Image (spheres, rainbow, N blue to C red):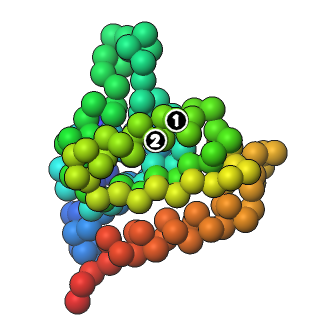
Amino acid sequence: MGDCEGALQFLNSLPYSNGKTGVIGMCSGGRHAFLAGCRIPGFHAAVDCWGGGVVMAQSELSSARPAAPIDLTKDLSCPLLGIFGNDDGSPTPEQVNLHEEELKKHGKTYTFHRYDGAGHAFWNYTREAYRPVQAMDSWDKTLAFFDKHLKCNS
């Protein structure tokens, strides 16, 4: 999270910054984007692309991961976009449902898009997991989300 905070401060210090910064990540990076939105004040948008490990069973916790990220949902300070494949094993559709329930419980601003026929890393065009139709649709939604939350209002 220190790297994310440092990047946020650097980007906001640039003379051409409009002061609005977003964070995006895929896979474990999706989890980290969610965590950044919960732990670091100052982000204006976060995008979680198939971030596994947000919902964790007690047995999965360790000294390196002492808390499940979902337990930090109450601290989310920016809008969240989630991109998920319904054929993914991490996160599973059930875990995405639990994540969404927690966001609703805390009144957070979020939008989740779920794609049939897509699994993990369906944007990665170098793998068999690539799903061009779902990838392009979700890319368009991601760009529109960032445009809505990061664009200057002037």
Residue at 52% x, 58% y is 113
| Pointers 1 and 2 in contact (C-beta within 8 Å) | yes
Of 102 and 11, the residue lying toward us: 102
Mark 1, secondary structure of its residue = helix
Real-space CA distance between mark 1 and mark 2, rounded to the nearest whole angstrom: 5 Å
Mark 2: give few (<14), some (14-19) or many (20+) Cα within 10 Å: some
Rendered image quadrant of residue 23: bottom left
Residue 13 versus residue 126 in the image, above or below: below
Residue 32 screen position, x and y as percent: 40, 39
Q: Is residue 82 left or right of residue 79?
A: right
Between 23 and 130, the one lying in front of the other is 130
Mark 1: few/some/many CA within 10 Å (<14, 14-19, 20+): few
Residue at point 57%, 35% (across, down): 92
Res. 71 in view: yes
Q: Which label belongs to residue 94?
A: 1
Location of residue 132 with respect to 61 vertically, above or below: below
- Residue corresponding to mark 2: 97
Q: Position of residue 54 (x, y in %)?
A: 41, 33
Taking the spot 32% from the left edge, 71% from the top edge, the residue there is: 150
On screen, 45 above or below 140? above
Q: Dot 2: what SS? A: helix
The structure residue drawn at horizontal position 74% and vertical position 56%, both measured from the top left corner, is: 131
**Amino acid type of disc 2?**
Asn
Q: Quadrant of the N terminus?
A: top left
Residue 74 in the figure: left or right of residue 118: left
